[in-house]
Image: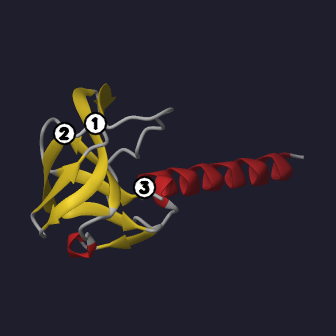
C-alpha cells in the first residue's frame, strides 16, 4: 500500500512539474513559443477591443500590461506601426527577444509584414514582449 501511495505521489509531482514547465514556455501560443519563462500569456478579452491596459502582479511586482490590436501599416525588425479598429495609429517597439507567433508558429520579428492583423503585449511601456497574428 505504501509503495502505491509513493508511486502516485511521484506521478503527481512529475505531472505538476511538466505543467509548470509548459506554462513557462508560453503554452498559450500552442506550445510553440518556447523560452519566455517570465513573460505572461495573452489574457483572454471578450468582445471587440483595440487597446487595453491591465494592472497585474508578476513575481510580486505590480506592472501594467498594454495590449493593442490592429493591422500592421509599417514593419521593421525594430518597430511595427498598427492601425487600430478605432482609427488610432500606434508605434510598438520590438526587441530581439520579442516572442512573435505567426499562425501558431514562433517566428522572428522580421516575419511581420504589412496588412497582418496582430495583437501586441507590452509591459510598462517597454518594447513588445509578445506579438501574435489573429485570424
Vertical position of residue 79 compared to residue 122: above or below: below
Task: Give the residue drawn at x 32%, y 38%.
Answer: 50
Task: Give the residue drawn at x 23%, y 40%.
Answer: 87
Q: Which residue is label 2 attached to?
A: 88
Left or right: where 41 falls relative to 6 = left
Q: Which residue is label 1 attached to?
A: 86
Q: Is residue 129 visible?
A: yes
Vertical position of residue 87 compared to residue 114: above or below: above
Q: Residues within 10 Å of mark 3 (few under 14, many from 20)?
A: many
Q: Quadrant of residue 52?
A: top left
Disc 3 or disc 1, which is closer to the eye? Answer: 1
Colouring used for the render: secondary structure
Mark sitting earlier along the chain (2/3): 3
**Mark 1 and mark 2: Cα distance apart in space:** 6 Å
Left or right: where 75 falls relative to 85 = left
Q: Position of residue 107 (x, y in %)?
A: 32, 73
Q: Which residue is label 3 attached to?
A: 26
Residue at the front extreme? 87
Q: Depth check: 57 or 77 in front?
A: 77
Mark sitting earlier along the chain (3/1): 3
Disc 2 or disc 3, which is closer to the eye? Answer: 2
Task: Give the residue drawn at x 51%, y 57%.
Answer: 22
Q: Depth check: 82 or 59 in front?
A: 82
Marks 2 and 1: in contact by CB < 8 Å?
A: yes
Q: Depth check: 116 or 111 in front?
A: 116
Amino acid at each position: 500500500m505504501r509503495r502505491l501511495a509513493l508511486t502516485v505521489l511521484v506521478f503527481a509531482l512529475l505531472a505538476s512539474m511538466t505543467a509548470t514547465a509548459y506554462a513557462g514556455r508560453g503554452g498559450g501560443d500552442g506550445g510553440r513559443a518556447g523560452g519566455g519563462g517570465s513573460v505572461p500569456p495573452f489574457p483572454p478579452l471578450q468582445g471587440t477591443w483595440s487597446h487595453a491596459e491591465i494592472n497585474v502582479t508578476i513575481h510580486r511586482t505590480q506592472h501594467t500590461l498594454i495590449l493593442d490590436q490592429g493591422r500592421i501599416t509599417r514593419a521593421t525588425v525594430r518597430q511595427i506601426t498598427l492601425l487600430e479598429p478605432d482609427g488610432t495609429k500606434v508605434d510598438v517597439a520590438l526587441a530581439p527577444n520579442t516572442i512573435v507567433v505567426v499562425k501558431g508558429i514562433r517566428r522572428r520579428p522580421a516575419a511581420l509584414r504589412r496588412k497582418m492583423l496582430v495583437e501586441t503585449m507590452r509591459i510598462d511601456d517597454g518594447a513588445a514582449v509578445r506579438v501574435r497574428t489573429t485570424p
